[in-house]
Amino acid sequence: VQRNPGESEFHQAVKETLDSLVPVLEKYPEFAHQKMIERICEPERQIIFRVPWTDDKNQVHINRGFRVEFNSALGPYKGGLRFHPSVYLGIIKFLGFEQIFKNALTGLPIGGGKGGADFNPKGKSDAEIMRFCQSFMTELYRHIGEHTDVPAGDIGVGGREIGYLFGQYKRITNRYEAGTITGKGLDWGGSLVRREATGYGSAFFAREMLRTRKDTIEGKRCVVSGSGNVSIYTIEKIHELGGKVVACSDSNGYIFHEKGIDLAVLKQLKEVERKRIKDYLLFHKDARYVEKGSIWDVPCQLALPSATQNEISGKSAALLVKNGCIAVCEGANMPTTPAGIRVFQEANILFAPGKAANAGGVATSTLEMMQNASRDSWTFEYTEDKLAKIMTGIHNLCYEKAEEFGSPGNYMKGANIAGFIRVANAMLAMGVI
Ligand code: NDP
C-alpha cells in the first residue's frame, strides 16, 4: 500500500490473490526465497503518455494514456485497452495483474499486460473516436508488436476502435503486422468467434461448474449485468444452452423481461445504434426498466456479472443468495467485492472468479494470433470447439488445484494457485529477472 499509494483496485486484486497463496509458499519454499511474490507484484514496465486530440468543434482535449507491461515470463504481454473516464493507473494495474494469472490458466504462451485511457467515448462522433484512437496509437505503436506486446479490446474498445488503432499502427510502421493487435475485423486478419469468445467462454465455464453438482444450465433463470460485448454473447450462449436470461443493464439502469431478453433487439440497440438499454422498452412494452436500480435485486439461480469491477456488494450478494442463487460466474474482471465473495463462499454456492471464467476472450485472441502467424483462417465450428476445450481445461485445472491445496470447490483459490505456479516456475527458470 505504501509502495503504490491510492491504487485501491490494485491493492484489492493483489490481496485477493496473495490470500490464496499461503499453502503454495509452504509447499515451495524456493518461491519465498526467490522473492517471487514481490517480483510478480511489480510491473516490468509502466508507460504513461499524453493523448491530445481535437473534437468536431475544433476544441483541443488532453487525455492520459496507459500501458502496463506486467509480466512476460510466459510470452509477449497480452491484454486489452479500456477507454473509460474512470481509468487511472490503479485500474490498469489491477487489470494487468489479473491478466497475468488469467493468461497463465489458458495454457497458451502469453504474458500479462493492460492499457487504456481516461477518455469517455460516450456521445463522441465517429470522427472524434477515430482521431482519439490515432493519437493514442501515435505514442503506443513504439511499445507494441507481435513479439513484444499485443493489445486488444475491453470496456469502450470494440471492433470500431480496434480498426482505427490498427490502421494507425500500420500507417506509422509501414508493416502489416496483423499479430500486433487482436479483435480485428474478419476481412483484415480477425478470427471467427473472437467477438463471441468472452461471453461464450463464461457460459461454458458455468456449464462445467454446474456439472460438478450434477446440474445443467437447462431451464435456469439467469441475470447478466451489462449490455456490452461480454454480456451480449453470454446471453446468446446461455439461451443456446437452454437457460433464460431475464435481466441485463447499462450504467443507467436495468431491464427486466420475464419472457427472456430478446437478443436481436439488444444487438440492434447496442451494436448497431449504440443506444441506451432503456430503449428496449420501445420494442417490448411488457418489459420493465428500473432507472439506477440494482440488477441484483432480480431473483435468479445463475448470476453472470459482466459489466465492471465491484458491481456486487456484500448486500447484493446476500440478496442473491436469499433469492435462491446457486452459482455466480464472473464475466467481468473483479465484479464481486471482497464482502460479496465472502457471502458466496459462506453460502457454499458455486463461484467462478473472472480470471478463470472470462479467459475465453484472451484465449481466442491467441487463436487469432496463431491464424495470423500461419496466414490461415479457421471455421467458426473449429474455433468454437477449441474455445470450449480451453474453458473445460481451465475449469478442471482450477478444480484440481483447489482440491490439491486443501480447499475443494474453491475456484478462486484454484485459479490463483494454478496461475501463480505456472508463472513463478517460468520466472524461476529464467533467473533473477
Ligand atoms: P463493453 O464496453 O462492451 O460493455 C461494458 C458494459 O458494462 C456496458 O453495458 C456498460 O454500460 C457497463 N458498464 C461499464 N462500466 C460501468 C460502470 N462503471 N457501472 C455500470 N455499468 C458499467 O465492455 P466489455 O463487455 O468488453 O467488458 C465488460 C467486462 O468484461 C469488463 O470488466 C472487462 O474488463 C471484462 N472483460 C472483457 C473481455 C472482452 O473480451 N471484451 C475479456 C475479459 C474480460 P454503459 O454503456 O452505460 O457504460
Image (tube, rainbow, N blue to C red):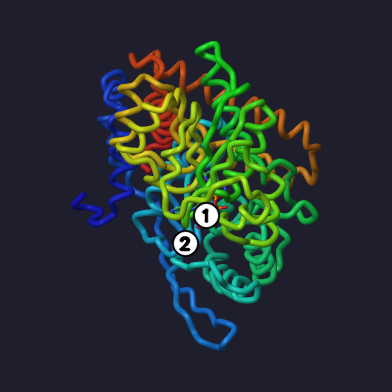
Q: The residue under label 1 is which amino acid type? A: Ile
Q: Residue furthest bottom?
A: 58
Across and down, in percent, residue 200 comes to 63, 35
Q: Nearer the viewer, residue 257 or 96?
A: 257
Q: Quadrant of residue 366?
A: top right
> Mark 2 and mark 1 in contact (Cβ < 8 Å)?
yes
Which residue sits at x=38%, y=39%? 336
Point 73% across, 60% down: residue: 176
- The residue sitting at 63% across, 41% down in the picture is 261
Residue at the disc numbered 2? 84
Residue 369: in sight, yes or no? no
Q: Is 341 left, or right, of 191 in this rendering?
A: left
Q: Is mark 1 within 8 Å of ligand 1?
A: yes
The verdict on label 2 being within 8 Å of ligand 1 is yes
Q: In the rendered view, would you say 28 is above or below 121?
A: above
Residue 379 picture location, percent across and down: 81, 37
Numbered badge on residue 155: 1
User: In the depicted view, which residue is nearer to us: 69 or 277?
Assistant: 277
Front position in the image: 265 or 110: 265
Residue 387 horizontal/vertical position (percent) = 66, 32
